[in-house]
């Protein structure tokens, strides 16, 4: 394999390219779902091939193939595409500089998922089904596991050669009672130990009972309230109102016709944009500084740029974009190592890594004690945000009542809160310390044309937001 890949890069040099790179990916997945006591899905997939980029006179050509014996043909196709593109080229592409690297990287794991017998995985899921199904009032129950392994090779005409091996493991449970859902689960860069750590069998009955309780609960009241968002909801708030707006390709307009634009502009690098309060510091952490096994962790991106920990927002002030090699020079910067593709047949584009809310100083009980009346919200149910990522609306699975600084035990269904991005983050007046930190995996972030579904993650702690507008369901 290595010889074939390096020969392809030698051939690109012989053609006279300015630069070329190749990313080989071998991706295998396993998904298991049990629903109402029956295995409803048992599937494995494998996808293998190579994508090649060629740059000639400031124009880029791309071609991909699943036939590794035809890499030189693929190089030539990418080269011819670049030549054709150069005819109508308006602006030459300038790539951010990087070093030539030879290295290996592998996700640290304890238990290889494929080593665990299939019947053991299925029996765990069926046990969860049985535990949830025994709760009176449950109309549907589901349990699932999801595994993914990626072998990735990157090489280029600068003589880089990088081999990486990634694992993704996790699962979850979901219980429905009438029109109310309670769910629990996670996906991490880890082995089968991630499934065991979730303790799904121990959680199943509680999740089902909460679904039934929600089906009998009142709708959450409307008005302005103080809120505590738990990491299971904060992850999506971070994703949609910070992660996407700070992607540089979106800011520069490349996603405007499909996934939308951003209210952030290139001029905001001057430090003038107040994104949130002094309690809000958010980073893009591909190196996994806290060793949290986020899905956005890697050694190198798909352009051969080392993983980095970049501050996006520092104490409420916008500081940096997420960028890749082809757009970072537009704002006079080097790539932040976020050029990633979801497979071998697609180009790398700017993608989120682990976009994390940094820990604060608050203990959870102290945060709670300073609320006269409000709600604690968990797990996202639905969301909506405009194409510039300003106005948003999020619905959660459950709201827990807070009164006189304590959780009363009363729950409400259909909590919906709304706001404007910078005003909302500006209302944050407390973030819990790292003892309450949780990493949540996002396996289905869609972006690009053609659509690419990428994996990223978000770590956060419970955070408090003052006077947030809640609206009535329906």
Image: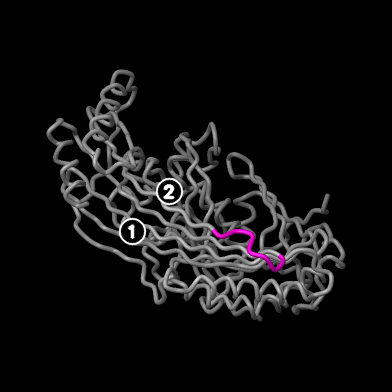
Q: Is residue 37 magenta?
A: yes
Q: Which residues are magenta?
A: 36-42
Q: Residues within 10 Å of mark 1 (few under 14, many from 20)?
A: many
Image: 473 above or below 126: above
Q: Residues within 10 Å of mark 2 (few under 14, many from 20)?
A: some
Image: 98 above or below 282: above
Measured in 3D between alpha carbons, the distance from the residue under mark 2 to the one under mark 1, in whole angstroms, is 17 Å
Nearer the observer, disc 2 or disc 1? 2
Q: Residue at x 44, y 36 (%)?
A: 252
Q: Under tag 1, what secondary structure?
A: loop
Q: Is residue 269 magenta?
A: no
| Residue 342 tag number | 2
| Relative image position of residue 455 (x, y in whole percent) | 48, 55
Q: Earlier in the sequence, mark 2 or mark 1?
A: 1
| Relative image position of residue 414 (x, y in whole percent) | 79, 59
Q: Residue at x 70, y 57 (%)?
A: 381
Q: Is residue 464 visible?
A: no
Task: Report the front residue among 223 and 338.
Answer: 338
Q: Quadrant of residue 362?
A: bottom right
Task: Report the front residue among 349 and 454.
Answer: 454
Q: Quadrant of residue 10?
A: top left
Q: Which residue is mark 1?
A: 307
Q: Residue at x 78, y 76 (%)?
A: 134
Left or right of 474, for residue 390:
left
């Amino acid at each position: 394999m290595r010889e074939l890949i390096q020969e392809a890069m030698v051939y690109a040099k012989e053609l006279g390219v300015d630069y070329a790179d190749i990313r080989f990916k071998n991706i295998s997945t396993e998904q298991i779902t049990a629903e109402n006591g029956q295995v409803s899905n048992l599937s494995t997939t494998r996808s293998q091939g190579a994508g090649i980029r060629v740059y000639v006179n400031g124009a880029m050509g791309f071609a991909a193939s699943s036939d590794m014996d035809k890499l030189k043909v693929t190089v030539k196709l990418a080269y011819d595409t670049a030549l054709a593109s150069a005819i109508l080229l308006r602006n030459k592409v300038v790539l951010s500089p990087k070093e030539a690297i030879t290295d290996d990287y592998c996700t640290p794991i304890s238990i290889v998922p494929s080593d665990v017998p299939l019947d053991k995985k299925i029996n765990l899921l069926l046990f969860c089904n049985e535990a949830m199904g025994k709760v009176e009032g449950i109309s549907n129950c589901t349990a699932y596991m999801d595994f993914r392994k990626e072998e990735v090779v990157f090489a280029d005409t600068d003589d880089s050669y990088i081999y990486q091996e990634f694992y993704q493991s996790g699962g979850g449970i979901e219980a429905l009672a009438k029109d109310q859902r309670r769910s629990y689960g996670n996906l991490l860069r880890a082995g089968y130990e991630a499934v065991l750590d979730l303790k799904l069998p121990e959680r199943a009955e509680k999740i089902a009972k909460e679904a039934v309780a929600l089906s009998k609960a009142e709708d959450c009241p409307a008005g302005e309230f103080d809120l505590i968002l738990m990491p299971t909801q904060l992850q999506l708030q971070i994703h949609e109102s910070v992660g996407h707006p700070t992607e540089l390709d979106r800011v520069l307009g490349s996603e405007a016709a499909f996934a939308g634009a951003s209210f952030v502009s290139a001029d905001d690098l001057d430090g003038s944009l107040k994104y949130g309060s002094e309690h809000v510091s958010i980073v893009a952490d591909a190196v996994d500084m806290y060793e949290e096994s986020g899905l956005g962790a890697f050694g190198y991106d798909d352009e051969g740029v080392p993983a980095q920990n970049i501050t996006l927002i520092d104490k409420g002030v916008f500081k940096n974009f997420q960028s890749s090699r082809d757009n970072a020079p537009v704002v006079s910067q080097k790539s932040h190592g976020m050029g990633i593709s979801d497979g071998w047949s697609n180009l790398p584009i700017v993608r989120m890594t682990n976009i994390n809310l940094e820990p604060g100083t608050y203990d959870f009980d102290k945060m709670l004690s300073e609320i006269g009346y409000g709600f604690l919200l968990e797990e996202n149910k639905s969301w909506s945000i405009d194409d510039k990522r300003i106005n948003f609306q999020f619905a959660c699975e459950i709201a827990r009542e807070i009164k006189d600084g304590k959780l009363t035990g009363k729950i409400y269904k259909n909590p919906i809160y709304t706001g404007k991005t910078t005003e909302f983050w500006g209302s944050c007046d407390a973030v819990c310390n790292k003892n309450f930190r949780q990493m949540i995996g996002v396996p289905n972030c869609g972006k690009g044309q053609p659509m690419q579904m990428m994996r990223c993650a978000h770590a956060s702690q419970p955070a408090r937001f003052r006077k947030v507008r809640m609206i009535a369901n329906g």
